[in-house]
């Protein structure tokens, strides 16, 4: 038996030029690489200015070899390092005085240095750098401070001077002009021992809330007549009203109107933990606004006192991790704050962090993973007392399995999506038909399908080539028809899909699924109520795997995360298993198990071992908060018999959105993918095992024959590369 939490994390030994044990080194993630800079060697009490690069995919360290001509900064520790325009931005820290050999002859710094990651060279300081900023705006030298970059500005917050006096101020450095531009007093103590300041590269937009705040723009015209000259819609035209469209949150580059905020979290007084959260919003003219959200934080449990916390922003979640130490228990604890409803919840990585010494965490946004560095054989208490950082092992935590991920970006903005949908509904440039399995037809544009459906474009090319060859080999006189040539058994030319004709394509799907599929190509989004119907959404995810449509796959997973609830969990678990969506599969399984193992309250209260108040907070959707992914509370109704499946999800509406029996599909590379439906008389464990067995035996569409791991009564696909732990 494996607890479900163990499926969300795994441990690996790092290889390559593994850095030595360090104190006060900085880590910065840029793309799929993490850069470690500076620190003090534990063995020699000597500070270094080395840079190591860690590949977040292969877990290999590389020590960067610097040019002897570089102006290497003074070695330091407890400095700050941020990413900006493919550069590392290093500020301040504590160092040994120049021309001194005494390791106790310390000083603090206030310089700003940039390292070009592409050229792997330190950027030389301009000759007038020291005189570029007014003396009143140059910050005091400091160490153990906080920093963050947003809107091309470096924020330096708090810290301590050489005498360990708190510096309660904020400085802003313009990274474009290389000038200090602003200073402001800040009435709170902030430092790396108790605080963390983070921002994100992408801003999450909430279009539904933005539309409620801003009236609908009349520029699009009247629904049903947006491409009509007379602006008159037919009386019987099937039109989707703008108010009925469902626009899910999406990621976008920050703008002046929607910048990326800086989140500053502090916890202190560890015997009676006090927590503070403030949001810095950059404004024009080098100014910024501060919003205190300390009193808005809620939850059934809160983070304990975390020492030397690290943090990150992923999607709409603020993640904080750090060392928790009490007289009876010590651990590395990870927590997430849903910034939409301001609810705290704990991230449980299972046994991956149960033993060993773990201190430094970082986020890989592109993979929705949180990584923790340390030594799985070390002592957390001893290493903490020495402030020691180890890099021998790394634990990777799948945050998407907790419902925490970066929402997808839009290929078309919201208004363009609505116009594309209007073009389909009004039959604009319709010269092609997609025929459903019930004979109904969806009129559309062949050129648009070729532009946005690579598989269709390739099949059209093969069809045209085959037709051209047939015309060229056709005899001029019908009486002189030669015998047909028998093709050799060797290599044959690829033939077009037989379902394709010059003016139509037969798609073996019901009409609702086919229409939703075509709606995606016109809008490049999942925005209609039809597309969000659970049975249709399942088929869209299957079609994305069959035809290798990565963007549709991401959007369908995003919509399923938002729709995940008790009622839909079994169906989502099944289709995510077939489509190898492992993170979604694990999250749905957590919901299935949480519902199946419900018991009447026994009156006993469980206390978290990490010292947090209340019970562990896992919501109905398998996410980290007590809310559904779409912001609605999904309280279950009458109790379903334990172990029974919810057939209403995959059965679909009476119109035939999903067939009651099994159906086979051929994916883009010619392999077969199976689909099954579940009946409500079949026990849930049997249905889940049937789905997994089918997907494993088919081996199609990129599906791998993965290891089956028995998890508390259900089987789940567990890739061997993800569960094996290297020593």
Image (cartoon, helix red, strand yellow):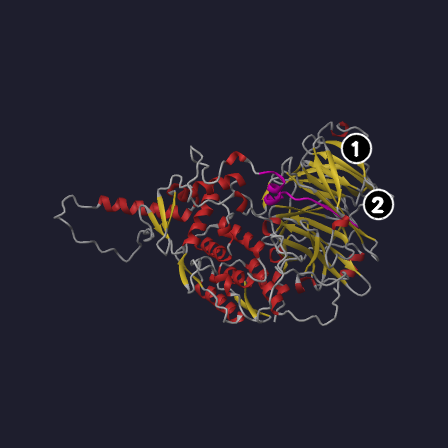
Q: Which span of residues is magenta-colored?
A: 193-215
Total tally of numbered discs in the picture: 2
Task: Say which of 355 and 644 sits in front.
Answer: 644
Quarter of the image with the N terminus is: bottom right
- Which residue is rendered at x = 79% and y = 28% of the image? 134
* Label annotation for residue 417: none
Q: Quadrant of residue 283?
A: top right
Q: Tell me the distance, in whole angstroms, between the alpha carbons under discs 2 and 1.
A: 28 Å
Q: Quadrant of residue 170?
A: top right
Quarter of the image with the C terminus is: bottom right
Circle 1 sits in a helix, a strand or a loop, which is it?
A: loop
* Label annotation for residue 102: 2
Examine the structure image and report whether residue 501 is included in the region drawn in magenta: no
The image position of residue 615, as x and y in percent, is 72, 63
Looking at the image, residue 478 lies above or below residue 561: above
The image position of residue 367, as x and y in percent, is 59, 51
């Amino acid at each position: 038996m494996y607890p479900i939490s163990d499926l969300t994390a795994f441990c690996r030994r790092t290889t390559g030029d593994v850095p030595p044990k360090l104190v006060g080194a900085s880590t910065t993630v840029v793309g799929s690489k993490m850069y470690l800079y500076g620190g003090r060697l534990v063995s020699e009490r000597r500070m270094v200015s080395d840079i190591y690069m860690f590949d977040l995919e292969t877990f290999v360290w590389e020590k960067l070899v610097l040019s002897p001509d570089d102006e290497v900064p003074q070695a330091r520790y407890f400095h700050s390092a941020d990413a900006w325009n493919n550069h590392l931005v290093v500020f301040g820290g504590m160092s040994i005085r120049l021309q001194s050999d005494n390791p106790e002859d310390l000083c603090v710094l206030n310089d700003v240095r940039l390292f070009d990651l592409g050229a792997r060279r330190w950027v030389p300081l301009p000759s007038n750098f020291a005189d570029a900023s007014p003396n009143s705006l140059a910050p005091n030298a400091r160490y153990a401070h906080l920093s963050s970059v947003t809107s091309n500005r470096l924020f330096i917050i708090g810290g301590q001077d050489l005498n360990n006096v708190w510096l309660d101020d904020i400085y802003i450095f313009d990274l474009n002009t290389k000038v200090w531009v602003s200073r402001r007093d800040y009435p709170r103590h902030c430092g790396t021992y108790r605080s963390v300041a983070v921002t994100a590269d992408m801003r999450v937009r909430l279009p539904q809330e933005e539309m409620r705040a801003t009236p609908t723009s009349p520029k699009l015209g009247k629904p049903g007549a947006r491409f009509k000259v007379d602006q008159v819609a037919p009386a019987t035209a099937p039109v989707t009203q703008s108010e009925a469209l469902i626009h899910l949150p999406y990621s976008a580059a920050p703008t002046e109107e929607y910048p990326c905020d800086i989140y500053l979290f502090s916890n202190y007084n560890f015997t009676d933990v006090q927590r503070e959260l403030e949001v810095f919003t950059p404004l024009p003219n080098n100014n910024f606004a501060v919003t205190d959200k300390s009193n808005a934080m809620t939850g059934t449990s809160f983070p304990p006192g975390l020492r030397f916390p690290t943090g990150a922003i992923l999607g709409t979640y603020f993640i904080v991790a750090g060392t928790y130490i009490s007289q009876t228990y010590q651990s590395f604890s990870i927590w997430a704050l849903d910034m939409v409803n301001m609810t705290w919840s704990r991230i449980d990585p299972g046994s991956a962090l149960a033993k060993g010494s773990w201190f430094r965490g970082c986020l890989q946004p592109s993979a929705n993973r949180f990584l923790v560095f340390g030594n799985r054989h070390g002592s957390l208490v001893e290493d903490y007392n020495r402030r020691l950082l180890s890099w021998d092992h790394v634990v990777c935590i799948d945050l998407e399995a907790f419902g925490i991920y970066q929402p997808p970006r839009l290929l078309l903005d919201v208004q363009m999506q609505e116009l594309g949908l209007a073009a389909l509904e009004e039959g604009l440039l319709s010269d092609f038909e997609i025929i459903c399995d019930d004979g109904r037809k969806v009129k559309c544009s062949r050129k648009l399908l070729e532009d946005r459906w690579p598989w269709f474009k390739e099949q059209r090319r093969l069809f045209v080539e085959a037709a051209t060859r047939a015309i060229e080999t056709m005899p001029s006189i019908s009486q002189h028809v030669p015998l047909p040539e028998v093709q050799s058994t060797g290599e044959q030319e690829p033939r077009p899909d037989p379902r394709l004709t010059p003016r139509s394509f037969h798609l073996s799907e019901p009409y609702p699924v086919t229409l939703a599929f075509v709606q995606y190509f016109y809008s490049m989004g999942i925005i209609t109520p039809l597309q969000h119907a659970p049975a249709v959404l399942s088929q869209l995810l299957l079609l994305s795997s069959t035809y290798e449509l990565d963007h549709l796959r991401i959007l369908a997973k995003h919509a399923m995360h938002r729709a995940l609830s008790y009622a839909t969990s079994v169906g989502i678990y099944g289709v995510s298993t077939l489509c190898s969506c492992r993170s979604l599969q694990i999250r749905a399984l957590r919901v299935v198990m949480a519902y199946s193992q419900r018991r009447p309250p026994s009156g006993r209260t469980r206390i978290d071992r990490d010292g947090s108040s209340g019970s562990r907070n896992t919501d109905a959707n398998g996410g980290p908060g007590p809310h559904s992914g779409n912001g609605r509370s999904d309280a279950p109704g009458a109790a379903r018999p334990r172990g029974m499946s919810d057939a209403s999800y995959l059965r679909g509406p009476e119109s035939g959105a999903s067939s009651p029996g099994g159906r086979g599909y051929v994916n883009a590379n010619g392999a077969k993918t199976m689909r099954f439906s579940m009946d409500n008389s079949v026990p849930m464990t049997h249905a889940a095992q049937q789905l997994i067995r089918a997907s494993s035996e088919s081996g199609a569409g990129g599906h791998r024959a993965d290891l089956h791991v028995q998890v508390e009564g259900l089987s789940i696909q567990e890739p061997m590369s993800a569960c094996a732990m290297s020593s």
